[in-house]
Amino acid sequence: MSGMQPVPRQIPGLPALDGPAEQVTEVWLANRRLSEHTRAAYRRDVHGWLAWCHERGLDPLRATFLDVNAYARKLEAIPLAATTVARKLSGVSSWYDFLLKLRAVDANPVGGADRPYIDRDHSSTVGLSAEEVDALLGRAREAGERTHAMITMLADLGLRVGELVG
């Protein structure tokens, strides 16, 4: 990684970091098939972890599951929803999996950490009722075949707009 130029990323609300860990983050993100929205979220999640490590003088390549646990408890104390904390830890875990493949770390410290419990059968996201979907599809049909086809795919498959457009 020594030949890489730093990739400065200023993320609102987080301190400016620019070093090898951030460079590795950009390489990790470049090697993933992700939407730009997901890429930006992962970048923020890893940057938040790196900033937390930096504030404590902790080398992220030497972090342990105890450090990750302390970070997770800090996120919960903000307070962030359990799903948000779990997503942030998932991004950091994926970053460490990439570092494992590069042999930059011996273990993924997120693997042994205590992650928040997430009830996979419940979501706080409020969806449309069947009647609302029917009304939406009716209006989309009036707008033309293409619009109707796109709205039908979004509704039936639960696609994100970026997935549909892609």
Image (cartoon, rainbow, N blue to C red):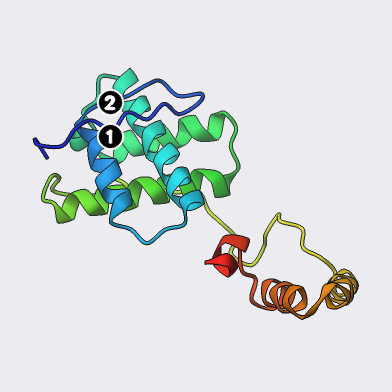
Report the amino acid beneath label 2: Asp
- Looking at the rendering, which quadrant does residue 59 occupy? top left
Relative placement, left or right, of 150 versus 100 is right
Per the model, the C-alpha gap separating discs 2 and 1 is 6 Å
Location of residue 36 in the rendering, given as x and y in whole percent from the top left corner: 47, 51
Residue placed under numbered mark 2 in the picture: 18
Judging from the image, what secondary structure is the residue with disc 2 in? loop
Instruction: Give the quarter of the figure containing the N terminus.
Output: top left
* Image marks 2 and 1: residues in contact by CB distance under 8 Å: yes
Residue placed under numbered mark 1 in the picture: 22
Observer-nearest residue: 108 or 91? 91
Judging from the image, what secondary structure is the residue with disc 1 in? helix
Mark 2 Cα shell of 10 Å, populated few (<14), some (14-19), many (≥20): few
Q: Residue at x 31, y 36 (%)?
A: 66
Location of residue 28 in the rendering, given as x and y in whole percent from the top left corner: 27, 50
Mark 1 Cα shell of 10 Å, populated few (<14), some (14-19), many (≥20): some
Location of residue 147 in the rendering, given as x and y in whole percent from the top left corner: 75, 73
Relative placement, left or right, of 34 versus 95 is right
Report the amino acid beneath label 1: Glu
